[in-house]
Image (tube, grey):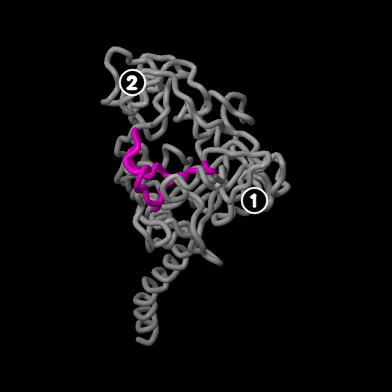
Amino acid sequence: MKALKIRSVLKLAFPACLGLLLLALAVTNARANAGPHGGYTASTDACAGCHRAHTAAAPKLLVDAVPNLCFTCHGSSAAGAATNVTDGMYEGVGGGNLLAGGFVNYQGLPVTSTHSVNGTSQNAWGSGVNWVSTYDCAGCHNADSGLVWPGAPTWGISPNAWPTYPGRGQNVTMPLTCTSCHDPHGGRNYRVLQQRLHPPYTQQTDPPGYVLVTSNELGGQNPNQAGYVPNYTNPKYRLGLGDWCTGCHATYHDSPSINPFNAEDGQGLVTRYRHRMNIQLGALTTALPLEDPSGNGASADDQLFCVSCHFAHGTNVAATGLAANVAPANDSSLLRVDNRGVCEDCHKK
């Protein structure tokens, strides 16, 4: 009778203990190229965090569809990771604002422009002219070619493109999700960025023709090096991220444009002039983040790149006065400073 009573108590206690164990596992923060993102072993348990072999609820055997699956760890009030991309907050030791901004809020305020994350199609401004195909990137990456890019199977010509000039630098539309930009299985790129991009210009490649993105974070230049520790709140950019962006925004390295370009701003098909990218600032000073190829801190080789002026996820800045409704984006354009304060930060007038 006594043994039976003990067994009954154990039977009742086991689910509670199991629940506490699962809770403890859930609140263990993961980071890039750790937890479920890389570092797999022959007996890995990471697969079970996202996949089910026979009872998956979403394609690719996922337990939920992207982005909801990603937000179970990286969303508001999620315990799986310290990087809350919904609110743009780092919730680990020391806290702080994420370097990429946020998709819904940033610094406690609603965002005014974001990259798409839920599969909604948005124009990719500055795409295409270097690829010289009938429908720009979609000329190669479409359902018939077999070269569909991860997360973007329905790239198409912008609805505002000139029908008489379909191949002259028209913007394409992209239904982006988290995995369009990030590889959930990890890799050599900073912030597990996709390694399949082949932008027209790149300062470092891995393998040749594909951009390598590195940082000056603790422990090495990329996440696969021993001792690598990501820094989510202080910019430690080294090289490659500005080139990586041009995998979609292909024309933004060209000044002026190689061919006349319809930017969908009402000016039509004309030559376009753009701010130079990947350039050293020289005598200019700025508080904006720069790439530091030498990894030695502020120095003469520091260079301007896309993320110097723009957030990757979303921004909370205002666009008012002369900066309001500027075509083609007609919003705050993922900028880091209200209106066009990023210009003044370098070119102090």
Query: What residue does disc 1 label?
Result: 217
| SS label for mark 1 | loop
Decide: is 323 above or below 249. Answer: below
* Mark closest to the chain's N terminus, 1 or 2: 1
Amino acid type shown at disc 1:
Glu
Q: In the rendered view of the protein, which quadrant contains the C terminus?
A: top right
Residue 85 vs residue 33: left or right? left
Residue at 62% in and 34% down: 279
Spatial separation of the CA atoms under disc 1 and disc 2: 44 Å
Q: Position of residue 270 (x, y in %)?
A: 39, 18
Residue 203 vs residue 105: left or right? right
Nearer to the camera, 144 or 24: 144
Dot in front, 1 or 2: 2
Residue at 42% in and 37% down: 180
Nearer to the camera, 201 or 10: 201
Decide: is 189 above or below 102. Answer: above
Residue 268 - label:
2
Nearer to the camera, 176 or 276: 276
